[in-house]
Amino acid sequence: YGNLIYDKYRKVYYRFVYPETELEAGRNYMDVWQLGRSKFTVIILDKSMNILGETIFPENIYASNLFFIREDGLYLSTSFVKNPNYDDDKLCFRRFDLIRQ
């Protein structure tokens, strides 16, 4: 498990979860560990820690350790070293909206 963060605007918690991943021997994974793992999900919890939903994110796109919350949503960084659009000169984020069903 990773971070558990509170969204005061929507009154929910986001729990970052990392499924089991196999690592290739002999590779340096320090950059990936600092920005977050390739595979992760975010579980959405209410104030009583009941699960409201879960989102599985595509591999190698988002830096799961770079995020922030604003009034308009949760922002996750797309500046992940394995992202095909990664640019060392830019720090980019994408907003995610919580949609209640």
Image: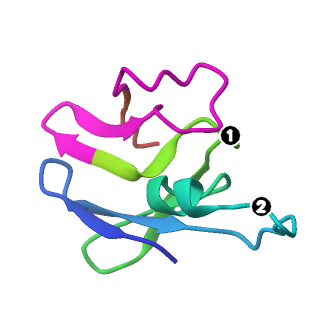
Is residue 49 left or right of 16 when viewed as pictured?
Answer: left
Q: Which mark is residue 27?
A: 2
> Tell me, what colour scheme is on the image?
rainbow
Give above or below for 20 relative to 27: below
**Residues tagged 2 and 1 counted as in contact (Cβ below 8 A):** no
Q: Residue at x 61, y 68 (%)?
A: 18
Q: Nearer the viewer, residue 21 or 13?
A: 21
Residue extent of the magenta highlight: 68-92
Q: Nearer the viewer, residue 79 or 69?
A: 79
Which-is-in-front pick, marks 2 and 1?
2
Identity, as a three-letter code, of the amino acid under mark 2 = Arg
Dividing the picture into quarters, in which one does residue 70 lie?
top left
Q: Position of residue 35 (x, y in %)?
A: 46, 53
Q: Residue at x 24, y 73 (%)?
A: 47
Is residue 20 left or right of 72 when viewed as pictured?
Answer: right
Residue marked by disc 1 = 58
Q: Position of residue 9 (x, y in %)?
A: 13, 48
Is residue 47 left or right of 86 when viewed as pictured?
Answer: left
Q: Is residue 79 magenta?
A: yes
Dividing the picture into quarters, in which one does residue 95 lie?
top left
Name the chief secondary structure element in magenta: loop
Compare marks 2 and 1 and give the one earlier in the sequence. 2
Q: Residues within 10 Å of mark 1 (few under 14, many from 20)?
A: few
The Cα atoms of the two marked residues, 2 and 1, are separated by 22 Å
Q: Secondary structure at mark 2?
A: loop
Q: Secondary structure at mark 1?
A: loop
Q: Residue at x 78, y 68 (%)?
A: 21
Give above or below for 24 relative to 76: below
Identity, as a three-letter code, of the amino acid under mark 1 = Pro
